[in-house]
Amino acid sequence: PIMSDAQLGVSLGRTRSPLVSNALAAKAAKSTVGNAVLVNKRQKGNPVIDHLKGVPWEYNNDILVDYQVGSTAGVLYLSLKYHHLHPQYIFTRFEKLGRNYDVRILLILCDVTEHQNSIKELTKACLLNGITVVVAWSVEEAGQYLATFKLYEFKSHQLIKERVDADYQSMLRAALTTVRGVNKTDVMTLKTNFGSFSNIVHASTEDIQLCPGFGPTKVRRLREAFNKPFYSTGQKPIPINNDLVQSDTTMNITDVQLAQEMGRQVSPLADIPTSTTQLNRYSSPEWDIEHVNTRLRASLDPELSLELNPSDEDAPSDDVSE
């Protein structure tokens, strides 16, 4: 069955305070000093434990999760077959877990044929509760995931970052291959013929076309990359329309009458050449704030005012969970 949003977000707003005491948390963290995966006693008999290879593990009944793979990382385990029989079970676990652990993982064992809707539902619930979803297709793979989480507990994020060497050749290759159609061989050709990045940038189109592998299209893309200006927003500047400038030099008669009724002195517009792109500005006359506000309040439509200022009931709630 599909859970409602209220059921999916069971831990939103109601589990701000940790549910486990500091003494239990300290005891569980102390047990991880020996590089052991802490296994909740409720997992006894789970075949996944037999596939925890390469890392020690021990039972611990003081943890909120099924597997604690680090002092700040906990894993909840769920079989989709069990989830279909007991759909409320995992949401109760989410509620008890709350915001404990910096890294919260739901390890799903996909052991059913019809799994698309269930995984979609669980993914939505995990997004609402700040939990990472990992899907395993066998108990062996699930055990390997748990062991890997523990082995990589203190690994740096540098392992998954792209490595770009600091030497000139590597940086030149990384820069030029960002141009569409330019590969590493083309970079070597350009460096051999021109020597440096500066010489490549200032080379003429004819000189680049003499290099092997550089046709008209590749040369055009390379020249565009060197010569086109940069735009911070990715958009070109909006061109000035002379017709719009000319139309701005005239004032609508209704605007003039309204301003005169409010007591504002309207300065006459001088003759402005239509070819110019900048309008001459005149100093603003003194504005009677109290008089204008009185007239404006009288002309306001109360229904429109309510639409522009929604009530507190219509406004979005500020109580949004992280």
Image (cartoon, helix red, strand yellow):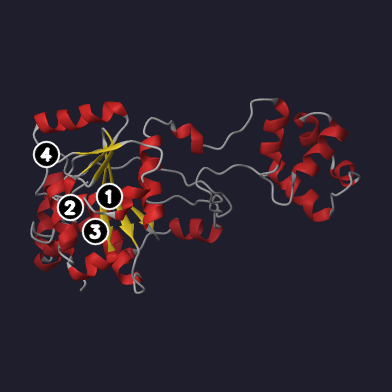
Question: How many numbered marks have been drawn onto this rendered protein structure?
Answer: 4
Whether residue 299 is visible = no
Amino acid type assigned to the residue bearing label 1 in the image: Ile
Q: Earlier in the sequence, mark 2 or mark 4?
A: 4
Residue 25, given in percent of the width and then of the height, sits at 15, 32
Q: Is residue 23 positioned above or below 234 on the image?
A: above
Mark 2 crowd level (few <14, some 14–19, many ≥20, 10 Å Cα): many
Amino acid type assigned to the residue bearing label 2 in the image: Phe
Report if the CB atoms under discs 1 and 3 are less than 8 Å apart: yes
Does dot 1 land on a helix, a strand or a loop?
loop
Q: Earlier in the sequence, mark 3 or mark 4?
A: 4
Q: Nearer the viewer, residue 297 or 202?
A: 202
Q: Quote the CA–CA distance across marks 2 and 4.
A: 13 Å
Amino acid type assigned to the residue bearing label 4 in the image: Pro
Report if the CB atoms under discs 2 and 3 are less than 8 Å apart: yes
Return the residue at label 2. Answer: 94
Return the residue at label 1. Answer: 131
Residue at image point 40% right, 47% down: 144
Q: Nearer the viewer, residue 131 or 80?
A: 80
Does dot 2 land on a helix, a strand or a loop?
helix
Foreground disc of the pair 2, 3: 2
Q: Quote the CA–CA distance across marks 4 and 1.
A: 16 Å
Return the residue at label 3. Answer: 125
Mark 3 crowd level (few <14, some 14–19, many ≥20, 10 Å Cα): many
Does dot 3 land on a helix, a strand or a loop?
helix
Report if the CB atoms under discs 3 and 4 are less than 8 Å apart: no
Mark 4 crowd level (few <14, some 14–19, many ≥20, 10 Å Cα): few
Q: Which label number is shown at residue 18? A: 4
Q: Nearer the viewer, residue 290 or 58?
A: 58
Mark 1 crowd level (few <14, some 14–19, many ≥20, 10 Å Cα): many
